[in-house]
Image (tube, coloured by chain):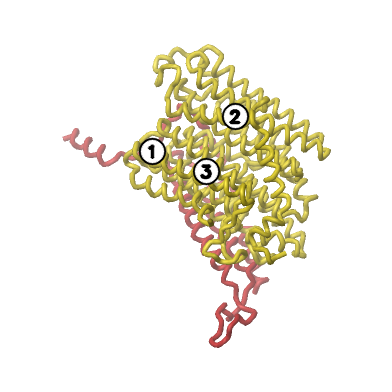
Chain colours: A red, B yellow
Amino acid sequence: MEGVLAVLTGLIFAASIYLMLSGVLVKFVFGFALASNAANLLIFTAGRLEHHRPPLIPMGATALSEPAANALPQAMILTAIVIGFAMLTFLLVLLYRTYAETGTLDADDPRLMEEADDDDAQIATLPSEEDKTAAERQAA
Amino acid sequence: MNMLLVWPILLPMLTAVATVLCRADARRAHWMALGGATVHLGAAVVLLVVVIEQRFLVGRMGDWPAPFGIALVADYFSAVMVLITAVIQTTVTVYSRQDIDADMVRAGYYPFMQVLTGAVCGAFLTGDLFNLYVWFEVMLMASFGLLVMGRRLSQLTGGIKYVTLNLIATLLFLAAIGLLYGMTGTLNMADLHGKVALVENSALLTATSMMLMVAFGIKAALFPLFFWMPAAYPALPAAVAAFFSGLLSKVGVYALIRMFTLVFTNDIGFTHTVLLGVAGFTMLFGVLSAAAQMEMRRILSFHIISQIGYMVLGLALLTPLALAGAIIYMLHNILAKANLFLVSGLVRRVGGSYHLERVGGLYHTHGLISIGFLISAFALAGMPPLTGFWAKLLVIRASLDSFQYAMAILAALVGLLTLFSMVKIWTEVFWKPSPAPVREAVPQHPGASGPLWMLVPVLVLAGLILVLGLFMEPMIRFAELAAWQLLEPADYVKAVLGGDKP
């Protein structure tokens, strides 16, 4: 079982690196999602796998009978999943905004090479409710 | 006693909550953040004093015994890093009053800064590798928020580079944690120190250490992983850029120093030789790239990279003197670099631009700003008697002692090139006559002082650099003790795990 998971982890990592290197940022997102799963799987496998042996002390006994499953990697994975999910959502929003502003998500596109300049314009934000009502009143 | 370790993390988080609640009122949010920062500074001072007295301070969270629960550990190195974080946070918060507009405050500028500070302190104080990962993520998330807050196009494009590269670093870090846990069954750093020696598969161990080196290297902006930094930092408001440049990359360096003195000393011949080469290239590429720039913040961003090289050089040499040099270098660089970014914001405010061609004559009109710049810039370049001189002296002396003559020459040469860049800014911004009379027509803050809330932090930091440079001896002695603690981890391990363990 560990061997299978090890190979699977390797395959997912390979696929995710391929996607990340493609130069298209949307594929980078998919690559990142895959890779964070691969990392979680890696931790899971590294914690050693035990079937049908939860780390519970049987009734009447005073100590855990070895071997038992390791609960710690699962706690770590749970943390990592939550963090990875937060990162993924931020990345998606960032790319969405960038696409809305520049019209491209190709990493080689010069529009994504924008350099900081103190004269650069702020991105126009959506008009707020106040602006809208003011405009409506004017129109009326 | 354990609570002392918790306050530097908890206080910023509490202040973050408070500033969220009153972010609609920019002035009140500022006072709230300033109050929190001041208390935080006090807590950091107390922590350092107690750590100097007791040498180690260990807090076992929930009173779980050490290798099982999460331990917070403060030794000399981490305590002084917490203190410098608090100093920078306080000055930057004062500066934010006039630099950060009400829009950004409403968007949550102060809460993000507070969370960032708490996460940085957490990263300095934790004694657990997985906990370090979590603090890194909290830090990343807060920095993402600050990075895109101004909604400029350059912030989005710079943000993409910053976010993607840092996410890759995160994944490498996580995967390395998994491998390390698989090999040793522990993630407590002090416990790892002993367990790593028992690992039979030394090739896998070295591979894991390289994964961590790359992960921290991306965060610290080492060669050849630094490309996100010059793209992202110049897009930030000056106050945020000062905080980021002072502290974020240094957290990467801190993690490198911690891991490669405490845990990965099994294959010094390989890992530390790699670090040595990387340090050399980082110094050289950073400073050469900076020489070609004509925008103040971009020059400064490239100089962060070259300065990181010195710190990693100190780690790579792994002698007491070299590590002491690296520690002093970090402290000096945090002060000088943050201050230079603060000055750049002032120059933009009173001169109208970050571009060297478009401003000038500030020496005549704004004498105090020039003094603030002069002290920090020459400290960065390493002119005696400022802090940078001593830091460079120690690192170069240590490379000579280790017979790394090429590195010593390189370090001296990079110092010279740094001076070139700083003199370039000095002559362009402060000495040359003001180029555009158009700009002068709209001076936002006439008079010799400029915006006072922004000027005072600059002068305070410059004064600190001057005083530390003049009274360097106690600091060097302190840094030598800190370096000794890093190089002889037996005491650290004993303090964390308790006396019964060997």
Question: Against A139, is B498 above or below?
Answer: below
Mark 2 = which residue?
A: B467
- Label 2 is placed on what type of residue? Val
Chain ID at mark 3 = B
Residue holding disc 1? B30
Tell me the residue at 54%/24% (across/down).
B372
- Mark number displayed over residue B348: none
Instruction: For marks 2 and 1, give the one nearer the viewer.
Output: 2
Alpha carbon separation for disc pair 2 and 1: 28 Å
Percent across and percent down for residue B173 are: 62, 54
Tell me which label, 2 or 1, sits earlier in the chain.
1
Q: Quadrant of the C terminus of chain B?
A: bottom right
In terms of depth relative to the viewer, which is nearer, B125 or B361? B125
In space, the residues marked 3 and 2 are separated at their CA atoms by 40 Å
Residue of label 3: B160
> Quarter of the image holding residue B265?
bottom right
The one nearer the camera, B306 or A57, is A57
Disc 3 crowd rating (10 Å Cα; few below 14, some 14-19, many 20+) is: many
Percent across and percent down for residue A1 are 64, 74
Upstream in sequence: badge 3 or badge 1: 1
Crowding at mark 1 (Cα within 10 Å: few <14, some 14-19, many 20+): many
Decide: is A12 above or below B13.
Answer: below
Q: What's under tag 1, amino acid-wise?
A: His
User: Is any atom of residue B7 visible in this view?
Assistant: yes
> What separation in Å lies between label 3 and label 1 (alpha carbons)?
29 Å
Is residue A10 visible in the rendered image? The answer is: no
Q: Are marks 3 and 1 on the same chain?
A: yes
For the residue pair B494 and B404, the one nearer the viewer reads as B494
